[in-house]
Amino acid sequence: MISSNITFPFLKLIDKKLYFSLNTPLLNKIKSYLLNSYLLEASLLNDDNIVGLNFVKTSDTYDKEFFTLIFEVFKANTNIIIVKNEKIIDALHFKGLETTHPIINGLTYVYPNKALFAKEMNSKNLEFIDNYINNLEENYLKEKYITVISSLKRKRKTLLNKLNNLESDKEKDLSHLIYKDYGDLILSNLDKIKKGDNEFNYLSYSIPLKKDYTPIENSQYYYKQYKKAKTSLSLIDNYIKDTQADITYIDNILKIIPSYKEEDYLELIQELINKKFIKIRVKNILKNLKNAAKPYYFLINDVKIGFGKNVKQNNELTFKYAKKDNYFLHTKEGSGAHVIIFSDTKNKEIIELACATSLYLSGLKDGDVIYTKVQNVKKSNTLGLVNLLKYETIHINNYDEVKIKNLISEASRF
């Protein structure tokens, strides 16, 4: 891995497979130069912070071509240069003849002035590099799809405001149900009320009156307000339920996004467009993603553990791929991924690892996880949400996050 980070450039040999590809002019050129090439050697050049990677490839005319990728590892002056037959053919940063180290196409590559001293790597440097590599793909994808994440967060904020308003309206409507009693009391005491009265007191009731209304008109006014409140209440609970479901949907996405790969983001965008949930500007039309509903799985001791990253995958995993005697797991509180143990045998190690997977996908470091046989899991009216007939609870205090993250990142599709 080569990092041209301005503040901390480095080169390190890694065995981690990355599932994304940057699309920049220089990288595209490097790919064209080095495609189907063979790495001959890697060496330290000029006894300095310069690494040379020598490649050879066979051209279309069956001639051998030799390239050197030179990585100048200097803080604030990092550069990547492609050299062929000692001539510069491309670079990350070009420099003019007026500089002490010119980098120009066609010019013979000359080493820069030698560094006066070299600083050895320490444990903090190595830890920084390891963390950088481990989070590289996640951070890259977050940055690339930041508009999608930001849109979801804005939508969530809007929904929370909507929910607060709906709950306030519900409280107001509930307080108006007494208006039926007001109308009844006015109607049964017409002889005690006259037009121009501000208030009518009866037993424990103190009923405000409209001065320009007759007693009959006041009673009709309260009946009308009561009917309006009752009609509103019959609808508002559904609005609240739908709004809460939308908030839960977004929460589930935001919790599981750290485990997303490129294809997961594309599937999410397609899902959001199909649902017309948020407006997303897509430069290129998304192709039909055949695997969008296919969940993931990894193997532990020959036992398959499956999980979903979106509502479609959760639904398919639990109600299509899982068998009745398999085990279903989910975080006890809040939204999260469906996790299935594809085994009918209770194994403590497997259950705890599946619980850790459930917590990790929900962005939790510890907590309660419920598990039960799949036969006890029933569909609800909302895709991805389920009802459980019975379940057991297990508490996980801590788990190996790196291990779970690696298992999830290397998981396969069904």
Image (cartoon, rainbow, N blue to C red):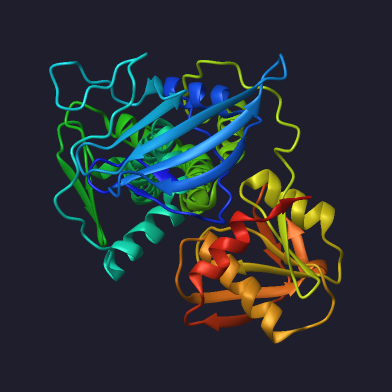
Establish if 63 lies above or below 115.
Answer: above
| Residue 100 placement, left or right of 215 | left
Question: Image point 40% across, 20% down: which residue?
Answer: 87
Rendered location of residue 119, percent (x, y): 21, 59
**Residue 221's x, y, as percent?**
34, 32
Determine which quarter of the picture holds residue 110: top left
Is residue 322 depicted above or below 152 in this figure?
below
Location of residue 90 with respect to 8 vertically, above or below: above
Instruction: Decide which of 33, 240 is in the foreground and name it.
Output: 33
* Residue nearest the viewer, comparing 143 with 230: 143
Position above or below: 119 against 401: above
Q: Position of residue 82 (x, y in %)?
A: 43, 27
Q: Is residue 190 found left or right of 413 in the rendered image?
A: left
Residue drawn where x is 32% and y is 60% of the image: 128
Of the pair 19 and 176, the residue shown nearer to us: 19
Q: Residue furthest bottom?
A: 348
Q: Image point 68% across, 83% down: which residue? A: 349
